[in-house]
Image (spheres, rainbow, N blue to C red):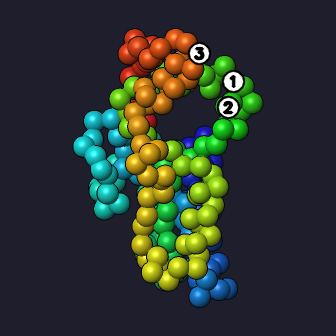
Amino acid sequence: QPALAEKVNVEGTRNVVEAITREAPSAVLVFPSSVSVHGYSANREPPVRTDAPFDGRDHYARQKIACESLIRESATRWVILRVGACSSPNDLTANGKSTPSMASLFSLDPETRIEFLHPDDAALAIERACHTEEAMGRVFFLGSGAKSQLTWRAFLSTYTRALGLGEAPRAWFGTGPYY
């Protein structure tokens, strides 16, 4: 529902920025954005930097880009955190259904580069951004570093190897893009 999402995301962000400006001008807005603002990663030379051009491939990415623009143009003190693949071991289903979630896992291009981030680490970064003066007016990627950077195929192959199936073959994957 792109129109509803636009209302919630972009207009909601506009309302928050206006409320801060009006009611608490010294407050800090820490905005959880997304790496999606830079488009898909499979065919891009790493590393992507925060000053890389925007590439709004879908409604979600375009809305995050619009939100970032609203925030940057405001008088509000802000920090933008572009969150990567944020998941925990408890994230096993999509909308309470495991089958669609599992099917979508193999729909992606296996060479898509991905960097995982645990939700606890994301929460800690958000909390620290609220109190770190050097972070004001800056944009950061949130990820877990080199040990959490891998391809989608390498990630899913940890499961197939654990099941005794060996490395997941290329034929099992689709060509779907991901950020």
* 71 up-or-down from 53: above or below: below
Amino acid type, mark 2 = Leu
Q: Mark 1 points at which residue?
A: 98
Mark 2 residue element: loop
Task: For label 3, count other residues whose C-alpha is less than 10 Å away and answer few (under 14), some (14-19) or many (20+).
Answer: few
Task: For label 1, count other residues whose C-alpha is less than 10 Å away and answer few (under 14), some (14-19) or many (20+).
Answer: few
* Location of residue 134 in the rendering, given as x and y in whole percent from the top left corner: 45, 81
Amino acid type, mark 1 = Ser
- Give the number of marks: 3
Mark 3 residue element: loop
Callouts 3 and 1 close, C-beta under 8 Å: no
In this orientation, does residue 36 appear? Answer: no
> Which quarter of the figure is the C terminus placed in?
top left
The residue shown at (57%, 20%) is: 162
Q: Name the residue under label 3.
A: 163
* 152 up-or-down from 39: above or below: above
